[in-house]
Amino acid sequence: MKTRPTSLLNTLFRSLLLPGFVAAILGVFIVYSLVKEEYDELHDIALLSKANLLMQVFEARNVPVRGASFADTSNPLLFEFAFLKQGERTVFWVLGPGQEIIQSSPDADQGLLAARIKDGLVTAFDHRIAQVSTPDGQLSVVAAAPMGERNEAIREVVLGVSAGFILLGMFVIFAAYRAVRRSAKVIADLSAEIGTKDAHDLTPIDRKNTFSEIEPAIDTIDTLMKRLDATLAAERAFATNAAHELRTPVAICVAHVQRLRTKLSDPAAIGSAAEIEQALKRLTRLIERLLQMSRAQSGLGTAAAHSDIAPVVNLLLRELRARVPSDTDLLITPSNGIWRSNVDPDAIGIILNNLFDNALKHAFGSSPLEIDASCAGRIVISNDCEALTPDKLGEIQDRFVRSSPAAEGFGLGLSIVRTLCQQSGSSLTLNSPLPGQTRGFCAILTLPIDGS
């Protein structure tokens, strides 16, 4: 089972996204830990400062510590009532030497004293509790601050930092995505450029917007294509030159054989001369096909400018009519109007002549050969013959493949047609049998016409 190639864009994006996500989580955790530690330290210092301040206040009042009443029972932390809500204010207790409560805040919960320690800080009952005592232990002050406000502040800081990380992460992801996408597009464009190269286009690769890191690879590909182009050009030149050089000697041989036949009187010798003439004519047709194949491989398909190709099609149809004058054997519907296209006229001539020759060669039966060019850019060639299988329809378009071993021809015509159709942007559809029948063969040639 063929696996789908991995996308470069997706690979780079995932490679950047996962580390970035992990880094953001670690960053939030580190910020939370540092902020909590520093914030707790500041609040603990403030709470201890309040406890020591209360101790100094009560010592300054010279408070009796043996069960007597305070001379001044005012709350030293009364200022918190002005800007803190209930449940957010610091509460305190003043304890005597026997740990009895001498004075406390109006809203102090005595249950919090169960968690106090001798001196220092402790967290219990959602409060932070601090206790300080005089050196002689005669007086102790316990101060307790709710943890809610402290925790809320830490949460807000963490949320703010997280929001900042999220915004920064979104910006980084967007910027990384755009950068990676631009880079991936350059690679994709380069890949598409390389993908267009074939035997008919071995020009150097367009290096616009490429990266310096892949320049050596492009240099290597250009060098290979240059060598391949030179090899293919040499092969085409050899085939073309060989075919051209053979045409004249073969034509001379045909002429000599024809003259020889007129001078012979022996029937056996005349028959042998006729066979030689047929063989030479067959060789002439083979040379013609080789020349057509060489031209097809050289990239003949398209012309530099668009032109009306309808006159070319009608000219070829008139030439075919001259070869088959009878209407009972050939029905032609010529083209009408203007067919503007960039297909090379010589390519059209080679394509249609090969299709016509193929139809004339294999047509047999009671139905005539039909050629319909009435639809702009579309030529339908139908002939009567035994139906071909779908596999055979695909095989006969390959080089040197014939419909049957006994069939005439060289198996090159449809291969040349397919090559020129690929170069010119035309399409060739083969059907057998004919629609609604059990026999016949149909070739539909569709040419690229302006406005179609």
Image (spheres, rainbow, N blue to C red):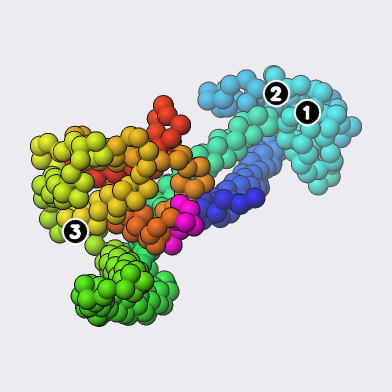
SS category of the residue bearing label 1: loop
The disc, 3 or 2, on the residue closer to the chain's N-terminal end is 2
Q: Residue at x 16, y 49 (%)?
A: 322
Q: Is residue 13 left or right of residue 219?
A: right
Looking at the picture, how far across and down is residue 391, in whole percent? 52, 46
Q: Residue at x 37, y 38 (%)?
A: 365
Looking at the picture, how far across and down is residue 135, in whole percent? 81, 47
Q: CA distance from mark 1 to mark 2?
A: 17 Å
Residue 279 in which image quadrant: bottom left
Badge 3 crowding class, 10 Å Cα cut-off, few under 14, some 14 to 19, many 20 or more, is some
Q: Is residue 219 left or right of residue 354?
A: right
Q: Main secondary structure of the magenta part?
A: loop
SS category of the residue bearing label 2: loop
In the rendered structure, which amino acid carries the disc numbered 1?
Phe
Q: Is residue 301 left or right of residue 8?
A: left
**Nearest the eye: 180 or 328:** 328
Q: Residue 405 in magenta? A: yes
Q: Looking at the image, can residue 124 be seen?
A: yes
In the rendered structure, which amino acid carries the disc numbered 2?
Ser
Quarter of the figure that contains the C terminus: top left
Disc number at residue 105? 2
The disc, 1 or 2, on the residue closer to the chain's N-terminal end is 2
**Nearest the eye: 116 or 61:** 116
Q: CA distance from mark 3 to mark 2?
A: 109 Å
The disc, 1 or 3, on the residue closer to the chain's N-terminal end is 1
**Nearest the eye: 334 or 19:** 334
SS category of the residue bearing label 3: helix
Residue under numbered circle 3: 346
Magenta range is 398-406
Residue under numbered circle 1: 125
In the rendered structure, which amino acid carries the disc numbered 3?
Asp
Q: Residue at x 68, y 35 (%)?
A: 54
